[in-house]
């Protein structure tokens, strides 16, 4: 999950080195947040303990949908081999 440092700077706070974490399929919208970074656009509610705004929710939703579609298409290709 990206964590906001400012309206244009985000960091990844997922703990990647936890035992078993490599078995997880992790979807992160961090790249999308960086690409959309603009001081005029609020991707987080600034007074809401790190909650995404509707714009941030949209970016995260698109990132999840794209990752899921990639997994499904990859699985379908493997099944067809």
Image (cartoon, grey):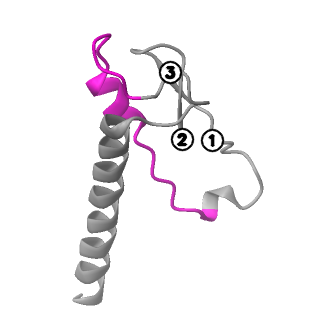
Badge 1 marks a residue whose secondary structure is loop
Q: What residue appears at the point 28 percent right and 64 percent down from the top-left corner?
A: 70
Q: What residue appears at the point 54 percent right and 16 percent down from the top-left corner?
A: 5
Give the residue pinned by disc 1. 14
Q: CA distance from mark 1 to mark 2?
A: 6 Å
What numbered label is drawn on residue 1?
A: 2
Q: Is residue 15 left or right of residue 73?
A: right
Of badges 1 and 3, the one in the foreground is: 3
Magenta stretch: give its range.
23-43
Q: Is residue 11 magenta?
A: no
Report the quarter where the N terminus lies: top right
- Name the spot of residue 9 as percent of width and height, x first: 45, 16
Viewer-proximal residue, 13 or 39? 39
Give the residue pinned by disc 3. 46
**CB under 8 Å between discs 1 and 2:** yes
Viewer-proximal residue, 36 or 74? 36
- Name the spot of residue 38 as percent of width and height, x first: 29, 15
Q: Is residue 16 left or right of residue 12?
A: right
Viewer-proximal residue, 27 or 40? 40
Q: Is residue 26 magenta?
A: yes
Mark 1 vs 2, N-terminal side: 2
Count residues near mark 2 (Cα–Cα under 10 Å), then give few for <14, some for 14-19, many for 20+: some
Q: CA distance from mark 3 to mark 2?
A: 16 Å
**CB under 8 Å between discs 1 and 3:** no
The relative height of residue 60 versus residue 24 in the rendered view (above or below) is above
- Name the spot of residue 14 as percent of width and height, x first: 63, 41
The relative height of residue 2 versus residue 19 in the rendered view (above or below) is above
Magenta span: chief secondary structure:
loop
């Amino acid at each position: 999950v990206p964590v906001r440092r400012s309206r244009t700077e985000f960091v990844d706070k997922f703990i990647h080195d936890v035992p078993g974490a490599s078995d997880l399929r992790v979807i992160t919208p961090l790249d999308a947040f960086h690409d959309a970074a603009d001081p005029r656009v609020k991707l987080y509610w600034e007074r809401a303990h790190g909650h995404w705004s509707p714009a941030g929710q949209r970016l995260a939703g698109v990132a999840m949908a794209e990752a899921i579609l990639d997994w499904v298409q990859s699985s379908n290709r493997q099944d067809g081999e």
